[in-house]
Image (cartoon, helix red, strand yellow):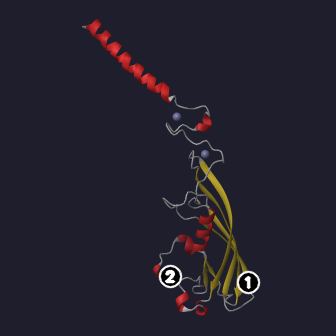
Amino acid sequence: MTTDDIPTSPLDDALRFDAVDLVGRTGTHRRVERTVPAPAREAGGLAMQVPEGDDIAVEIELESVVEGIYVHGTVTAELEGECSRCLDPVEQDVDVRLDELFLYPEKVRAEEREDAVLLEDDEVHLGPLVRDALAMEADERPLCREDCPGLCAQCGFRMEDDPEHHHEVIDERFAALKGLFDDDAQGEDAQDGKA
Ligand SMILES: [Zn+2]
Ligand SMILES: [Zn+2]
């Protein structure tokens, strides 16, 4: 599969770094900082994602080495999601290390190219790397706090608002039975009274 087959996303487009000045010049390096807006939230995607339009900040060093362009640095962003117990908003700051060697295509044998990370048109395509890095850091079951009491399983009440909240299941059954007898009594009353 060539890169032409893969549809590009705005994030991928924004995270291409020209390395033409470093290509073939082993030992040279350049520092780059770029802040790009997060793409639209993926429905059904990760629990924690960067809200659309919020900053994804990339700070990297591009280093020309014999095999290609070595990229190392960080990506920082603020992820947002919902507490998996009480659905309150949860934020998560992430600061992830990036580390990848983009190989010169001509130095990679054809049969190994599919699995290799290659320099493309003297550009470093950091989008997939950044997305993977954020996904790796994202909490799968975010919590507003470790001991979040969550919601009442029966009525959805926020347990935090009243830790004593509970349902008298047995009493309710008695109440239902009592109601049954009351209905009978009322029925008789009605018959006696209104007939
Ligand atoms: Zn919570
Ligand atoms: Zn309840």
Q: Amino acid at mark 2?
A: Thr
Q: Nearer the viewer, residue 42 or 137?
A: 137
Instruction: Find residue 100 and report its image quarter.
Output: bottom right
Whole-angstrom CA distance, mark 2 to mark 1, is 26 Å
Query: Can you see residue 14?
Result: no
Could you tell me which secondary element the residue under label 1 belongs to?
strand
> Is the residue marked by circle 1 packed among few (<14), some (14-19), or many (20+) residues within 10 Å?
some
Q: Residue at x 63, y 44 (%)?
A: 148
Q: In which quadrant of the rendered image does the C terminus lie?
A: top left
Instruction: Find residue 101 and report its image quarter.
Output: bottom right
Can you tell which of label 2 and label 1 is closer to the viewer? 2
Q: Is residue 98 above or below residue 66?
A: above
Query: Can you see residue 120?
Result: yes
Q: Is residue 133 above or below residue 142?
A: below
Q: Residue at x 28, y 7 (%)?
A: 192
**Which residue is under mark 1?**
29
Could you tell me which secondary element the residue under label 2 belongs to?
helix
Q: Residue at x 61, y 86 (%)?
A: 122
* Residue 34 drawn at (x, y percent): 66, 71
Q: Is residue 4 above or below residue 55?
A: below
* Residue 91 drawn at (x, y percent): 64, 54
> Is the residue marked by circle 2 packed among few (<14), some (14-19), or many (20+) residues within 10 Å?
few
**Which residue is under mark 2?**
3
Q: Amino acid at mark 1?
A: His
* Residue 95 drawn at (x, y percent): 69, 64
Tell me which label, 2 or 1, sits earlier in the chain.
2
Judge: label 1 CB < 8 Å from ligand 1: no
